[in-house]
Image: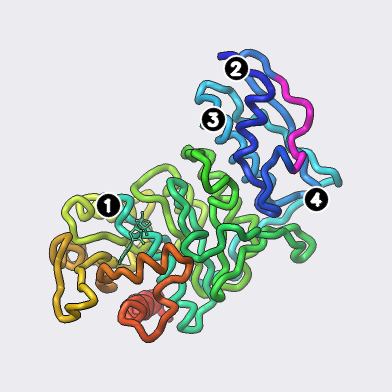
Amino acid sequence: MQLYPKLILDALSHVRYPGTGKDLVSSEMVEDDIRIAGNTVSFSLVFDKPNDPFAKSVVKAAEQAILTYIGEEVDIKGHIAVKYKQAPRPQVEKPLAGVKHTIAVFSGKGGVGKSTVAANLAVALAKQGYRVGLLDADIHGPSIPKMFGVEDARPVMEEVEGQPRIMPVERYGIRLLSIGFFVDPGSAIVWRGGMASNALKQLITEAWWGDLDYFVIDLPPGTSDVHLTLVQTLRLTGSVIVTTPQDVALADARKGINMFRNDKIDVPILGLIENMAWFTPAELPENRYYIFGRDGGKRLAEEAHIPFLGQIPIVQSIREGGDEGVPAALHDDRLTAQAFAEVARKLAAACGD
Ligand code: ADP
C-alpha cells in the first residue's frame, strides 16, 4: 500500500472537533509533521486550550478514520501526538460524582427500538421532575442526536472548578452527549472495540454531567468489549433490556440477560421493556395486530425473573417523533406518552425513587 500525506488528510477530514463541528483539517488542527515509514503513520494534532477534554476522543476518532478510510493495515494506534497551544495543567478526575442512578439500556440485536426507548424513557423521567442525562454510546449508529433534533449542536468546553470539561448539549431539559458528535454524520467510520471504549470512557469521565438523578446510557446492541468496559468504568445501578416479542429478538435478549448476570459483570437487571408489542391502526383504535408475536417479552421477563416494565405498541407517531427530533413522550395527551410515563415510573420505583 502506498501511503502519502494527502490520504491521511482526506481521512481526517471526516473527523469533527465537536466544540466547533468543523473537521480537523479545515480547523488546521493537523500539524504539518505527518511522517510515513512503511505502514506506520504518525503526526500531531494541535488543540488551543490546555487539557482540552475533547482531545483524547478526537484522537481515537482520528485513528478510527484512518483505519476505516485507508485500511486496517495502517499502523496508527498510539502514533498521534497531542499538542496544546497553551501548557497543560494536571487534571483531577471525578467521574459522575453527582449522579444518583446510572442505567444502561440494552438490546440483544439492532432495530428493536432500543434508542427510541432510551430517548423516550429519558424524556419521561425528565417530565416526572428528575434531572436526566443521556449518553449515546451506540457506536454502530449513534441516533440520539437525530432523535433530539441536535445533529448540528456543539458540545462546548467550559472550566468547572478549574478544570476544562465537555459540557453536554441540553435539549428538553436533558443533558446529552453522543459518540456521533465526533464524526461526520454521513461518514462511514466504524468504531472498533478498543477505540470506541476509550472514547466513550472519556465522554463519561471528562464531561461535566453535574448533578443528575438518572444517567441513561444507550448501549450498542449485543454483547461486546464496549459493554464490558462501560460496565467496568461505571458503577451501574442496573440495566434495562429492550426486546420485541419476536423469537430472534428474545433469543438475543436472553444472551444479554446472561451477560449481565455473569459473575464478572454482575449488574442488576432493573427490568424488561417489550417494544413493538402490537400495532393499532389509527382508523381502528380497538384493534391490535401482534405483528412480531404476542407477549414474548412479558413471558421472557417472567421466565428469567426480571421485573416487567411494560409494553410499547408500534405507533407511527413514535417513529415520526424519532425522525423529527421530538420524542413522542413529550406529548402528554397521547397514549404513547402515557405508556412511556408508566415505564419510567416503574423504573424509578425499581431504583428506589
Ligand atoms: P435500535 O436502537 O434498537 O437499533 P431504533 O430505536 O433506532 O432501534 O428504532 C429502529 C426504528 O424503529 C426507528 O426508525 C424507530 O423510529 C422505529 N421504532 C422504534 N420503536 C418504535 C415504536 N414503538 N413504534 C414505531 N416505530 C418505532
Asked whether the residues under the numbered discs 2 and 3 touch, taking CB atoms below 8 Å apart as contact, a structural biologist would say no
Callout 2 crowding tier (Cα within 10 Å): few <14, some 14–19, many ≥20: few
Q: From the image, which quarter does the N terminus lie in?
A: top right
Q: Nearer the viewer, mark 1 or mark 4?
A: 4
Label 2 vs 1, first from the N-terminus: 2
x, y percent for residue 14:
60, 39
x, y percent for residue 90:
78, 50
Q: Which residue is mark 3?
A: 69
Callout 4 crowding tier (Cα within 10 Å): few <14, some 14–19, many ≥20: some
Rounded to the nearest angstrom, the CA distance separating label 2 from label 4 is: 31 Å
Q: Which residue is mark 4?
A: 49
Indicate the secondary structure of the residue bearing disc 4: loop
Q: Amino acid at mark 4?
A: Lys
Magenta segment, which residues? 27-35
* Residue sticking out furthest to the right: 86
Q: Would residue 342 be visible to someone looking at this image?
A: yes
x, y percent for residue 169:
61, 64
